[in-house]
Amino acid sequence: MIKKHKIVMLPTEDNSLLGVHNRKGLLYAKNEGWCYIVKHDYIQPQHLYILSDDEIKEGDWIYDGVINEVHKVFHDTSVIGQDRKIIATNDPKLTKVDEISGENVWTSLIPQIPQSFIEYYAKHQPEYVEMEYECINKLKLVNNEIVWVEPDNELNLATNKFYMERAMKVPVSVEEKLYTREELEGFAFHTAQICQGMNDLEIEQWIKENL
């Protein structure tokens, strides 16, 4: 399932891969030979935020279109109609709570926008991006009984960069190159093992069927 999401760009005091230059316009740091863009009088770093119409819950991050700012939702936060949930960003300040144990709190970043898309955005500045979703059917164990949970459209990426790269529909340039069968088998083995978690037998079977 494909859904279209609005993209918002906001200025930041942080170092970023994206920035607006007084003369050159929107820049991608690595195209300029820089690791990051640092704020100066002539350049302003920027962050990207991908928005969703999904239900907003406590702990989510939202974009307030009225005041053009980003906020985290707490139990006493007033959410209005213009607010939109942020589902991905390159802003490292946006984190979510994974686990709480006593006084210990473990957090992680919300899904991060891949560098390939940031570079694409700097060149083309699209207003929207298409995201790929999976329709997931669930069975849950509740009070020792198996309970059916209605299918839910879930974003097929979590915090995994590999799936984020695959989910975001961004044109890529293709360089034609010839490889030997041994090289292709090596690429396939490495990719399946690292990205898909397949074991050796599963990989060998896939190679036999597909290469």
Image (spheres, rainbow, N blue to C red):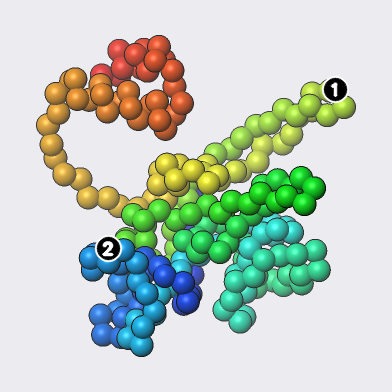
The reply to whether residue 167 is in sight is: no
| Label 1 crowd (10 A; few <14 / some 14-19 / many >=20) | few
Q: Residue furthest right?
A: 143
Is label 2 in a helix, a strand or a loop? helix
Point out the image quarter for the C terminus. top left
Image spot of residue 141 (x, y percent): 79, 26
Instruction: State left or right for residue 133 relative to residue 16.
Output: right
Residue 80: x and y, percent?
72, 72
Give, as a three-letter code, the residue at label 1.
Asn
Quarter of image, res 109: bottom right
State which tag comes first along the sequence, 1 or 2. Answer: 2
Location of residue 168 in the rendering, given as x and y in whole percent from the top left corner: 42, 50
**Above or below for 97 versus 11:** above
Q: Position of residue 113 (x, y in %)?
A: 44, 56
Query: Closest to the observer: 110 or 105?
Result: 105
Q: Is residue 171 above or below residue 73?
A: above
* In this view, the mark in front (1 or 2): 2
> Residue extending furthest bottom?
41
Q: Image point 64% across, 70% down: which residue?
A: 71
**Is any part of residue 103 visible from this angle?**
yes
**Which amino acid type corresponds to the residue marked 2 in the rendered image?**
Lys
Question: Mark 2 = which residue?
Answer: 30
Cα–Cα span, label 1 and label 2: 54 Å
> Between 36 and 193, which is closer to the camera in this rendering?
36
Q: Which residue is mark 1?
A: 144
Other residues around mark 2 within 10 Å, as few (<14) / some (14–19) / many (≥20): some
Q: How many numbered marks appear? A: 2
